[in-house]
Image: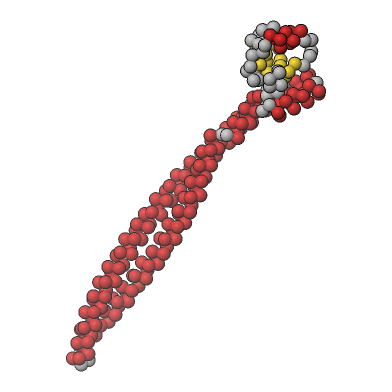
Amino acid sequence: MDTRLDQIAHATRNLPQRTRLAELEQRAAALDSELVRARTALGDIEREVSKAESDVQLVRERAARNRSRLDAGTGSAKDLQALQHELDSLGRRQAELEDVEIEIMERAEAAGAEVARLEAEHATLATDLEAARVAQDDALREYEAEAAKVAAPRADTVAGVGDDLVALYEKIRTQAGGLGAAALRQRRCGGCQLELNNVEMNRIKAAAEDEVLRCEECRRILVRTAESGL
């Protein structure tokens, strides 16, 4: 019972589902950071787009006013010539600003695509995380149920063994890596797996049925069986 309970405890601590969940959580944390950076970058570029659009619009409005004045023909020839010159300059400036605007909008489109990609990955990862949590919880419940089933008769068994022997058994278990007693089969200790010599076998054979026997090598309690080779 104790060996199986130890195995269950070890399996619970080393669940592959837990490892998988930890890996996904680590990836989710990294993805969250990536997404924050991508959204921040997109926001910055969108502000650049707004400014570029505003700059272009201002030039367009100034050009429209100059064109209206030029078409109206009001003012001296010198004034109209200056308006035409400014209108030509505004046309060149507008073209430059529109090129800048297009470049910024292309960057905004790329940044938006990156945000969309990360958001899609985030949604998929969220689904995977939920599935991993369910798988871990299911595995834990199975082990907990088995542990309860295995441990249920332990109290009655302990009562039948006796306090002194149980205390010795628990002490050895602590010292010997969890295995306090081992069956003697075919002259071999089930704990250290070493074969007992003839002197030891004769000593065990001559021992009283209720005598507590210990392996000379690993000091675990030896339990005699029909297969001990006595």
Q: Is residue 98 left or right of residue 132?
A: left
Q: Quadrant of the C terminus?
A: top right
Instruction: Say if 93 sits above or below 49 in the image.
Output: below
**Can you give x and y, in whole percent of width and height, for residue 210 in the image?**
79, 13
Q: Is any part of residue 135 visible from this angle?
A: no
Q: How many numbered circles are shown?
A: 0
Q: Nearer the viewer, residue 102 or 181?
A: 181
**In terms of image quadrants, where is residue 177?**
top right
**Can you give x and y, in whole percent of width and height, for residue 72 in the image?**
21, 86
Q: Residue at x 27, y 68 (%)?
A: 99
**Can you give x and y, in whole percent of width and height, for residue 180 in the image?**
70, 23
Q: Residue at x 78, y 25 (%)?
A: 167
Instruction: Say if 104 sits above or below 11 in the image.
Output: below
**In terms of image quadrants, where is residue 67?**
bottom left
Q: Is residue 6 left or right of residue 211?
A: left
**In terms of image quadrants, where is residue 174?**
top right
Q: Is residue 33 left or right of residue 162?
A: left
Q: Is any part of residue 29 visible from this angle?
A: yes
Q: Quadrant of the N terminus?
A: top right
Q: Residue at x 72, y 25 (%)?
A: 172
